[in-house]
Amino acid sequence: MSTTVARPASPVAVLALQYANPSRMVSIPLMILGAVVVVTTGIVVVLARSGADGELQSNGAIIWSLVGFIVAIGVQAVAVTFPLALALGTTRRAFTAGVLLTAVLESALLTGSALVLLGLEALTGGWFVGARVLGDATLGGGDARALVAVMFLASLSAILAGAAFGAAWVRFGARGPMVLGLAIAAGAVIALLALAPAFGAVGEAFEPWWLAVAAAVVIAASTAGTYLLLRRAAVR
């Protein structure tokens, strides 16, 4: 009699598990994008009728509206799915790789959707009222390549940062995310204080690619942190 040993679930299986809830992963993010377009366009109409500048050149509505939810996606990708994934035979390494794969796919979904909306915005002259939602300055001012870079890196960073906080909760309970948040805040304050005398020079020398490097650091640190936290985490 031969015995078949079950193979551990792959990162792709973890990806499929994450998207078992399409509402959280697909429907709600797309509805948020659509809602931001509608609300911002409405604000532009109100401002235009009051005689104010109706274009809102740099409102950052897309980024600020999405960031909280996509961080929550990252948190839930670990905190909710980790126990079930382990029960299905997934290793911690494969689970972390699956979370990274999920973050990449979700970021691509959001970026592709934003790119389509940018095209529609251009075709309609700013949703027929001169509104700049996807052509906002924070998203590249209508430059499709800049929008792709900003949306993808911002989404990927936010999801994986959320995953790290989710892993901290799985590993240490409620105090884990709190301690991690305090540590990050303290590090940021120390860095700002150290750089304060050079703010002027840094501002003059600033290049957009610095933000891409910062995003890459966040992505790498969050992924590594998620794995290290989950290595010894017990299933809750």
Image: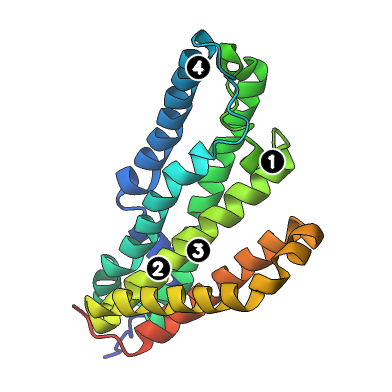
**Residue 88 in view in this figure:** no
Image mark for residue 20: none
In front: mark 1 or mark 4?
A: 4
Q: Where is residue 225 in the image (x, y as percent from the top left)?
A: 46, 80
Query: Looking at the image, which residue is at 31% across and 61% down?
Result: 76
Q: Which of marks 2 and 1 is nearer the N terminus?
A: 1
Residue labelled with disc 1? 140
Residue labelled with disc 4? 47
- Separation (CA) of disc 2 from disc 4: 39 Å
Kind of residue at badge 1:
Gly
- Separation (CA) of disc 1 from disc 3: 26 Å
Marks 1,3: beta carbons within 8 A: no
Q: In which quarter of the image is residue 227?
A: bottom left
Q: Where is residue 151 in the image (x, y as percent from the top left)?
A: 58, 48
- Separation (CA) of disc 2 from disc 1: 27 Å
Quadrant assignment for the C terminus: bottom left
Image mark for residue 163: 2
- Separation (CA) of disc 1 from disc 4: 23 Å
In the shown orientation, is residue 35 left or right of residue 118? Answer: left
Query: Looking at the image, which residue is at 71% across and 37% down?
Result: 144
In front: mark 4 or mark 3?
A: 4
**Residue 32 in view in this figure:** yes
Q: Where is residue 46 in the image (x, y as percent from the top left)?
A: 46, 14
Q: Earlier in the sequence, mark 1 or mark 3?
A: 3
Quadrant assignment for the N terminus: bottom left
Query: Looking at the image, which residue is at 52% across and 54% down?
Result: 155
Q: Is mark 2 on a helix, strand or loop?
A: helix
In this rendering, is residue 183 above or below 63? below
Residue labelled with disc 3? 101
Kind of residue at badge 2:
Ala
